[in-house]
């Protein structure tokens, strides 16, 4: 399963890059330079949590997203 991580600061982005560069596998960076978003696998997410880059409280969004309610 994938995770969507919204990056809050440049320091957080650099710390995430340092962790992700040491892991095997593919991850993606999306979004603009002001609001980057990382798409990572479970193993990458767990490593980011262990490194203290992201919080483990489940605030990340699922990669599938939610459907908008009909009006």
Image: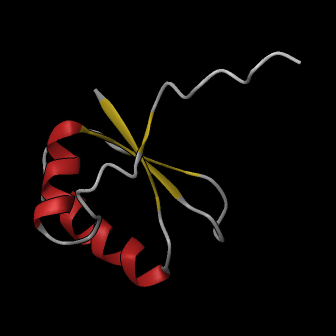
Q: Residue at x 23, y 57 (%)?
A: 56
For this orientation, the residue located farthest to the top is: 70
> Residue 25, position in %: x, y?
20, 39
Is residue 6 shown above or below 52?
Answer: above
Residue at x-position 30% and y-position 67%: 16
Q: Is residue 39 left or right of residue 36?
A: left
Q: Where residue 12 sits in the image (x, y, percent)?
A: 38, 76
Quarter of the figure with residue 63: top left
The residue lying at 19 percent from left, 65 percent from top is: 19
x then y, percent, for residue 28: 42, 45
Q: How many marks?
A: 0
Q: Is residue 64 left or right of residue 67?
A: left
In depth, the one of 45 and 17 nearer the eye is 45
> Where does the N terminus fall, quadrant-wise?
top left
Of all residues, the one furthest to the front in this rendering is: 71
In this rendering, is residue 25 above or below 44?
above
- Relative to residue 45, is residue 20 depicted above or below? below
- Image quarter where the C terminus lies is top right
- Residue 3: where, in percent of width, then height? 36, 39
Observer-nearest of 60 and 36: 60
Residue at figure coordinates x 49%, y 79% from the top left = 9
User: Looking at the rendering, which quadrant does residue 40 occupy?
Assistant: top left
Task: Decide: is 18 above or below 63.
Answer: below
Q: Residue furthest bottom?
A: 11
On screen, residue 70 versus residue 34, left or right, reads: right
Determine whether, in the image, residue 69 is placed left or right of residue 22.
right
């Amino acid at each position: 399963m994938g995770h969507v991580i919204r990056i809050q600061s440049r320091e957080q982005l650099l710390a995430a890059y340092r962790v992700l560069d040491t892991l095997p596998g593919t991850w993606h960076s999306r979004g603009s330079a002001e609001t980057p978003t990382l798409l990572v696998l479970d193993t990458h997410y767990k490593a980011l949590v262990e490194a203290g880059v992201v919080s483990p409280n489940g605030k990340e969004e699922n990669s599938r997203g939610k459907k908008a309610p009909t009006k």
